[in-house]
Image: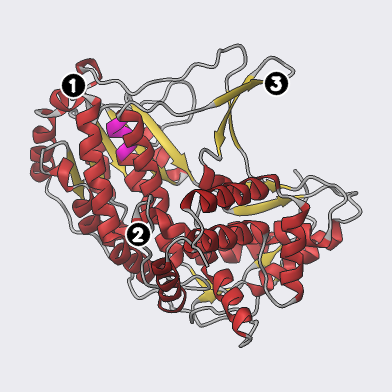
Amino acid sequence: MAKPSKGLATAGVLLFTYLAHLRTPWFRHLASNLKTRGVTCNEKGLASIVVFAALSSLWKSQMVSLAKYLVFGKKLKFAGMADGELGFLDSVRAELLRLAALAMGKFSTPIYPPTTLPTWHLSSPPTLPAKTMQSILQGLDTKKVQWASLPNKLRAVYLRDCIKNLIAVSEDLAAAAAACKGGYEAGIAEERLVAVGAVKTMREFAEVLEGGAPKVHFYKRESGQWVANTFPACWWENVFFSGWRGEVWVEPGKGPTQSRLSPGADKAGITCVLGAGNQYNLTIEDIVTEMFTHNKVVICKINPVLGFLQPFLQQIFEPLISLGYLAILDGGVAEGQYLCNSDFVSRVHMTGSAATWDAIVWQGKPKVGKPPFPKFCGGELGGVTPFMVVPGNWSRLEMQYQAKNIVSGLVFNASHNCLAAQVLVTARHWPQRAQFLNAVRAEMRKARPRASFYPGTKEKYDRFFAEYPQAEGVSPKGEEGTYPWVLAVGVPAE
């Protein structure tokens, strides 16, 4: 039998992509049939399985690679995509395993690795002398104009080298992060997925620096306000995020303009980045944004909670560190205060709590009028993020799918994310409200209790029960040191 041509197979892949993007009844029907046979596979996971199977049919070696990946977690190599970007398949690996197992007629239950609790614990970072930090800042100051004046294409070369370094250390980095936070249903794959996001961000920056302006579709709302469709941005995002949409709403009255990354000595300066304590990709992306969007050289202080991160960042950003454009420091509160208030630093960016922001910007003064901190300070602060459920006539499968999405947003990274699903907003008179909340409870019962790696969690957990006595511990009790997932229903909107 003749082997199908690559062109024909590619056309088939594009067809499957189109079907996945439209969420056709055929996909829903196939997903439903699989579920009745013991395979929990939503449309997104199913699309990924179908597309990867189609692609694998082109090359026999890919079938061997897929088998090694499924059974042993071996790295996949796939034409046309960077190794690091294939990490998104880890998010559907369990679905792939179960489908393969069903085909072999062996079993139809989930295959998950055992829970591993954190083995790396927070300790006091070393104290850095003021003279040491002063010397580092002086070195960066001599490089700031040179960096801001470099042509974009040269900066893209440096960034591409950093991407290669990140991919090279991603396995060890994910293992270190899992040692800090623990491993649960997805094992180390959850931390691998974090690296994929960083690679994607860096690659998109490099493409823009190389002259490839992002392809953005604009449309006008009835009010006349412009909206930019920014996600999904490519074919594989359409496959893996079928039905999802990301938009940027332009300020009312403003036109749909697109900025450009442009060098210039007038933009020279030093940014102090205070790294995140919850996700390592945020520190990577903050450094990249300050250097390549704002044209600043950077001094980055790592959050002690992720104190394992320093050697990895030094390896990832070695091309920029070796040229004197970037410095990575360990340290605590005292070091952060010194850097923020240094005359060498013109700009600050931090990821953390509102208390940290207030300490920098308001410096213990009343929050009235103009803040006493004279510099620009950008911040991504922790919050209690609401997930809003639009009422409608939902099917059972739609409820199950969305309940799984919400609970995934809750449990990911032990809920230590600014966008974690902390508040669920439903319509009081929605006829299916109780049914939907039961679907959420069912998914929460499946989620393993997790250990907290972030300081202060125990106190907040206890305070939650004191504030909401109706709260119910939904998930079963886990290993010692873990916390069950909790749901409090009927919280007033006020």
Q: Does label 1 or label 3 sit earlier along the sequence?
A: 1
Between 16 and 405, the residue placed more toward the observer is 16
Dot 3 corresponds to which residue?
A: 221
Q: In the shown orientation, is residue 85 left or right of residue 267?
A: right
What percent of the width, then of the height, locates residue 406?
Answer: 66, 57
Dot 1 corresponds to which residue?
A: 149
Distance in Å between CA atoms under marks 2 and 3: 44 Å
Q: How crowded is mark 3: few (under 14 residues within 10 Å), some or many (20 or more)?
A: few
Q: Which residue is drawn at 62% across and 56% down?
A: 44
Q: Residue at x 17, y 41 (%)?
A: 320
The type of residue carrying mark 1 is Ser
Q: In the shown orientation, is residue 472 left or right of residue 460?
A: right
Chief secondary structure of the magenta portion? helix
Q: Does label 1 or label 2 sit earlier along the sequence?
A: 1
The image quadrant that residue 208 belongs to is top left
The type of residue carrying mark 2 is Val
Give the label, 2 or 3, closer to the camera.
3
Q: What element carries label 1?
A: helix
Measured along the vertical axis of the image, is residue 371 above or below residue 196?
A: above
Dot 2 corresponds to which residue?
A: 305
Instruction: Write down the region rendered in magenta.
Output: 288-292
Q: Based on the picture, tell me whether residue 362 belongs to the magenta stretch.
A: no
Q: How crowded is mark 2: few (under 14 residues within 10 Å), some or many (20 or more)?
A: many
Measured along the vertical axis of the image, is residue 186 above or below residue 318?
A: below
